Every structure is written in structure tokens, then in C-alpha cells.
Image (cartoon, rainbow, N blue to C red):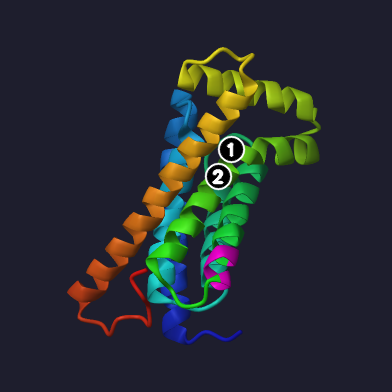
Amino acid sequence: MKFSTRELTTIAVFGTLWGIVEMSLGTVFKSLNVPVSGVVLSAIGLTVALVGRFFVPRRGSTLFIGVIAALLKLFSLGGVLLGPMVGIISEALIAELALSSLGKPRRTSFVLAGSLGVLWALLQPLVTGPLFFGRAVYDAWLKLLDRGGDLLGLDSNTALWIILGMAGLHLLIGSLAGWLAWDVGCQLQARLGREPAPATDL
């Protein structure tokens, strides 16, 4: 897998943009204890990464953008960084797999990549908590139900509806991120007067 100098520069630019989002908004959201900060950061970060994929429509570009963003996350102020870094790389990897599996860049693949990538933000505490921080899966599950119940206004005993509601919310936000990324990519290429990437609208 070889990229041209121009492609590597583009990947670095979009990876840096995603990293800046994580370093700035991530710190602010954490200090303010914003309840859905993970969803917002995932959606914004994946939007940036998917626009980058529009400009470098090659396998691996989205993953490399995420790796650069994760490395920049090391420069964030305070807090545990391992979880967010794993989250960024995981989101980029999921988006990469979704994009690569559907062939040519198209709006459908962008929407799928965005939705699945943001959905990971919901599932990540159940994976990274036990693996990296020694938390019990049960505790992570209860925290997820409490947070989801507060957000959706549901009793924590209605676990199925909370999970379905939270999953639907994440998928919706991720789909909107993918849709937006496609439109932004098209508009940027038009304004820059560049040759469009080999892509299809659907």
C-alpha cells in the first residue's frame, strides 16, 4: 500500500484536524462533564476523517487519519488518554472496513461508515473498561444503563428499550455525520476546482 506525497500530506492534514478536535473539544467536554461528549466527538472526528477519505479514496487512508489523530491525543491536558486513543483508532478502523467493503466511494458507504463508527462510542466502555482499567463488565453495563436512562428519560429497569434507544441515537448521529461528510467533500472539491474522485452518489 503506497501513497503519493500529496496523498500523505492530505492524510496528515485531516488526521491533524481530527486530533485538534479531540484535544480541544475533548478537554472542554470532559471539564464540563457533558453527558454525550463521546457521541459528539465521534461524529465530528469521523466527519473529518470521511472528508479526508473523499480526497484520498484509497484503502487505508481513513485508518491512517485515525492513527495520526490518536497520536496527537497524547498532547491533551490531563486525564487518562488510553481509552480515547483506543476509541479513535477503533472508530477509524471500523469506518475503514465499512468503506473498503463497499468498493468505490459513495454516499451509502459514507453513511454506513459514520453510523458504525459512532455506534462504537456506545460499545467501547464495555470493551475497554474491563481490558484496560480492570472494571467489571457488569459495572460498565450498569453505568451505560444509568446514563442512557437519564438521557432518554427511561427507567433503568427497561434495559432493552434503553439499549435500543441509545443504539438508534448513535446510528442516527453517525449516519448524519457520513451524509454531511459526503456533501462537504463534494463542495470542497468543487470550490478547489479539483478533479472529482471516482465516486458515485449512492
Give the extent of the magenta segment: 97-101
Q: Which secondary structure type mostly characterizes the magenta part of the structure?
A: helix
Comparing 143 with 86, the one in front is 143
The residue sitting at 35% across, 81% down in the picture is 197
Q: Characterize the local packing of mark 2: few (<14), some (14-19) or many (20 or more) Cα atoms within 10 angstroms.
A: many
Q: Which quarter of the rendered picture does the C terminus lie within?
A: bottom left
Callout 2 secondary element: helix
Number of numbered discs overlaid on the protein picture: 2
Callout 1 secondary element: helix
Residue 69 in magenta stretch:
no
Check residue 122 in the rendering and tell me which mark sits there, or answer none.
1
Residue 118 % position (x, y):
51, 46
Residue 168 % position (x, y):
49, 38
> In the image, what residue type sits under mark 1?
Leu
3D distance between C-alphas at marks 1 and 2: 5 Å
Check residue 93 in the rendering and tell me which mark sits there, or answer none.
none
The residue sitting at 66% across, 36% down in the picture is 125
Q: Name the residue under label 2.
A: 119
Q: In which quarter of the image is residue 129?
A: top right
Residue 193 % position (x, y):
20, 81
The residue sitting at 48% across, 46% down in the picture is 42
Q: Characterize the local packing of mark 1: few (<14), some (14-19) or many (20 or more) Cα atoms within 10 angstroms.
A: many
Comparing 62 with 6, the one in front is 62
Label 1 close to label 2 by CB (< 8 Å): yes
Residue 150 appears in the picture as rendered: yes
Residue 136 % position (x, y):
80, 28
- 145 versus 47 height, above or below: above
> In the image, what residue type sits under mark 2?
Leu
Q: Which quarter of the rendered picture does the N terminus lie within?
A: bottom right
Q: Relative to residue 7, is residue 145 drawn left or right?
A: right
Residue 100 in magenta stretch:
yes
Residue 23 appears in the picture as rendered: no
